[in-house]
Amino acid sequence: MMDTQHIKRAYEISRSRFADLGIDTDRAMDHLKTISLSLPCWQGDDVRGFEKTNQDLSGSGLQVTGSYPGRARTPEDLKMDLEKAFSLVPGRHRLNLHAMYGDFGDQPVDRNEIEPVHFKSWVDWAKQNRLAVDFNATLFSHPKAASGFTLSHRKKEIRKFWIEHVMRCRKVSAFFGRELKSPCIHNLWIPDGSKDEPFDRWAPRLLLRESLDEIFETEYSPAYMKDSLESKLFGLGSEAYVVGSHEFYLAYAVARRKIVCLDLGHFHPTESVADKISSILPFTAEILLHLSRPVRWDSDHVVILNDDLILTAEEIVRSRGRGRVHIALDFFDASINRVGALVIGARAVLKALLRALLQPEDALRDFEERGRAFERLAFNEEVKALPFGPIWDYYCLTLNVPPGIEWLADIERYEQNVLSKRENRNS
């Protein structure tokens, strides 16, 4: 156990060091308390969902690897795992839920038949845990997505099926927002694309535009739900061509006043997603970020405190994006403890945001405005050496969350007492 008094003493020393550069650590922590992350439900069960079907991820642009014991098999399992994860993450946060995770009972419910009633248990659970919910249409792992095309499919009946699904998902999203008194962001990602070079890139994008226009004909109050569109550079089975590219969705979002979703794993490895934030915010009211960690390709590794995450957090703060930039986590790893993975990712993002808030903002802006590049560089280098760890530990302590690595023992007990016993049940 970390000594509480030691943490407080270390914090006072660190606070003094930061104050020497004009940085108010108490103010930074107060700002961080106002930021909510949206944690992905799909990390808990390897993107399987709770539909009464035998799902197959092949051809959907998704690939989950690993078979670590303890996967959630029911809504009750997943809710229990999420409660454990949330208890180890400082602050008030949100759940990011996919349509395939409804509480469907014993009867099969097809995607174009879902209703708010199928998510009432999630609303009740969210109220009990003082959480808000974001939502995602599920346009993969379904026979009608086997071709790799959904909203841009050449067959009208296929497009109609998926249009109906997304329309119903928007209705469910408004239900969440109304019941939980917090706007639900409905995010749309589709796997549509081609493994090899297509002859006609134009026609599917026209069909996608038509499908989106039909979907968005029904308007909802932004107090209840907001729409976002998530692009991709390539995916499994769509290496050569993705219909919903970044340029397509950016143009559509600006023209139709929707939110652009930027996923850190959906761009070229050398492309800076952080730089896109200040490029898009002058033209759109809000941005949604999906934080993942690509390794060589969009492999959705657990988020860690690396350079990409730090740069993204800094840009959120420096672009005055707080309140306009929504932050969700998007990863799935079945090779390690799934609950622990959620905690690692969420705590890493909060660490990155806290570091970004602990910048000598006034001094750096002043140096930049006066053309003092030397002083700006010197300050940036000095900040890197300041004792950040004690600030993070103290922040966790003030919010009654285990500091340092103490939370690891909690996860290990949970694995022994809960997760390991699931392996004796039917899959």
Image: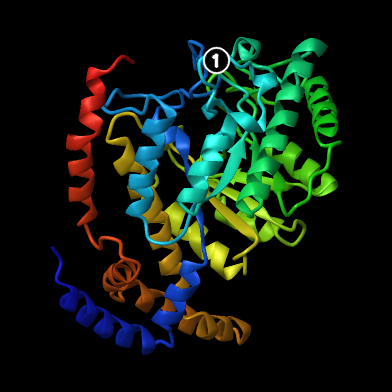
Looking at the image, residue 117 lies above or below residue 323: above
Looking at the image, residue 288 lies above or below residue 61: below
**Nearer to the camera, 345 or 1:** 1
**Residue 47 placement, left or right of 154:** left
The residue at the point 64 percent across, 48 percent down is 179
Residue 149 picture quarter? top right
Residue 35 in the image, given as x and y percentages of width and height: 51, 63
* Res. 306 in view: no
The residue at the point 51 percent across, 39 percent down is 265
Residue 313 in the image, given as x and y percentages of width and height: 49, 61
Look at mark 1 in the image and give the residue it sits on. 59
**Residue 366 placement, left or right of 411:** right
Quadrant, the C terminus: top left
Mark 1 falls on what kind of element? loop
* Res. 104 in view: yes
Looking at the image, residue 257 lies above or below residue 362: above
Quadrant, the N terminus: bottom left
Looking at the rendered structure, the kind of residue marked 1 is Gly
**Residue 81 placement, left or right of 290:** left
Residue 200 in the image, given as x and y percentages of width and height: 78, 17
- Structure colour scheme: rainbow
